[in-house]
Image (spheres, helix red, strand yellow):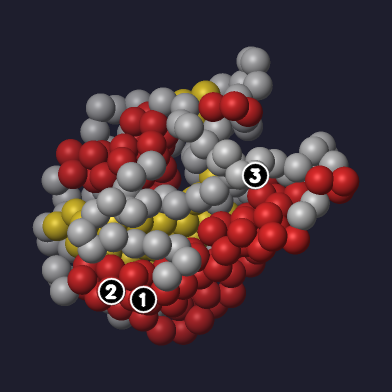
Amino acid sequence: MTGQSEPKGAKAARVDPGSFPQAGVAVVFGAGGGIGGALVEAIQAAKKFKHVVSFSRSTSPAIDLLDESSLERAAALAADQGELRLVIDATGFLHDDRQGPEKSWRQLDAANIARAFALNAIGPALIMKHVLPRLPRSGKAVFATLSARVGSIGDNRLGGWYSYRASKAALNQLVRTAAVELGRRSPNAICVALHPGTVATALSAPFAATGLEVHPPKAAARYLLAVVDQLTAEANGGVFDWRGQPVPW
């Protein structure tokens, strides 16, 4: 951690995202995960948005990061509810019973690398494809996707975790590139990647080292919303941690 103070409002029981226009729509992709579910609850508690729409593999309609048509359908459904002012992609893949982070190049497997990229980079890119053109042309609107500090190339001093690191680095580049195009279309819209820190979820549980600061999902959601609320157009295309500090490329 950086030692910087926590985002304004992060410790509060409820974050008030006052920088957004009234009566917009908030959307969370990946609402079935620990962070995604907590984000839905926090956004609903803020009572700032007219509608809070959530998507996961178990919602109706369901989303599948490997099925572009499901992502397009979800984006269209959300946009039908009103102006998309806040869209958060809380999807992400690190491990399951089939594969885990590689400790050495000896463990590299083409199929596993491709799967990590499909879930951590290509899926979110397709969400951007169908969400960003639907953001309002004026007024603050934010698309944020959850990345990871280990996706930073400049900050990589430990090695390992090849597929996860590379797929998150690719996601960061996709965000940066999409942000350039978004800025031409909607000058007040913001496309960013966010590092939530280490959160007590099934994704990070096996890898939470002793002494590492671990946030419960509800706290992580408040931190992230506080950061999103503070973002201005100058932040477009950036990668920021849960304190609002830039993450090195």
Residue bearing mark 3: 99
Mark nearest the camera among 2 and 3 is 3
Residue 210 against residue 224 in the figure, above or below: above
Residue bearing mark 1: 69
**Disc 2 marks which amino acid?**
Arg
Q: Is residue 241 visible?
A: no
Residue 201 against residue 92 in the figure, above or below: above
Furthest residue toward top: 211
Q: Could you tell me if the residues under marks 2 and 1 are in contact, i.e. CB atoms within 8 Å?
A: yes
Q: Nearer the viewer, residue 8 or 107?
A: 107
Mark 3 and mark 1: span between their CA atoms?
26 Å
**Disc 3 marks which amino acid?**
Gln
**Disc 1 marks which amino acid?**
Ser
For numbered disc 3, what is the local secondary structure? loop
Residue 86 against residue 139 in the figure, above or below: above
Residue bearing mark 2: 73
Mark 3: few/some/many CA within 10 Å (<14, 14-19, 20+): few
The earlier-in-sequence mark between 3 and 1 is 1
Furthest residue toward front: 98
For numbered disc 1, what is the local secondary structure? helix
Q: Measuring 57% from the left and 39% from the top, which residue is drawn there?
A: 97
Mark 2 and mark 3: span between their CA atoms?
30 Å
For numbered disc 2, what is the local secondary structure? helix
